[in-house]
């Protein structure tokens, strides 16, 4: 059994969701994956990049320069 966070979760919210629920959770993120300005594949990458940042304890805003998909998501939906 895992807690699930869903309902307009964006890559910019991943670190906060992980801080609130811990590392053992599921994130329902379909809408923001498919609505990513660079397409669904980039949307999935942006979430993976945000999860990597959260697991490493890095701020996604400062790491966005390394990840174009994450940067586009943060620009679109904010942090």
Image: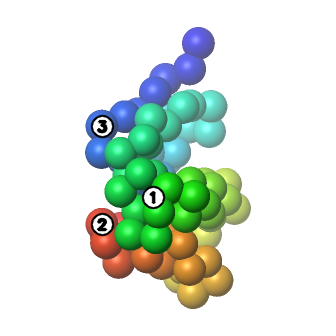
* Number of disc labels: 3
- Separation (CA) of disc 1 from disc 2: 8 Å
Q: Is residue 8 above or below residue 62?
A: above
- The tag earlier along the polypeptide, 3 or 2, is 3
- Separation (CA) of disc 3 from disc 2: 14 Å
Name the residue: 43% across, 42% down.
Answer: 29
Q: Is residue 69 above or below residue 32?
A: below
How far across and how far down the image is residue 27, in percent?
49, 37
Name the residue: 64% across, 83% down.
Answer: 66
The residue at which mark 3 appears reads as 7
Q: Is residue 1 left or right of residue 71?
A: right
SS under mark 3: loop
The residue at which mark 2 appears reads as 77
Whether residue 40 appears in this view of the structure is: yes
The quarter of the picture where residue 1 lies is: top right
How far across and how far down the image is residue 55, in percent?
67, 54
Name the residue: 56% across, 37% down.
Answer: 22
The residue at which mark 1 appears reads as 11
- The tag earlier along the polypeptide, 1 or 2, is 1
């Amino acid at each position: 059994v895992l807690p699930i966070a869903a309902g307009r979760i964006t890559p910019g919210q991943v670190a906060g969701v992980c801080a609130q629920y811990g590392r053992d959770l599921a994130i329902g993120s379909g809408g923001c994956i498919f609505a990513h300005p660079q397409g669904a594949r980039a949307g999935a990458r942006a979430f993976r990049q945000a999860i990597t940042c959260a697991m490493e304890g890095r701020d996604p805003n400062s790491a966005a320069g390394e990840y174009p998909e994450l940067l586009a998501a943060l620009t679109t939906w904010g942090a």
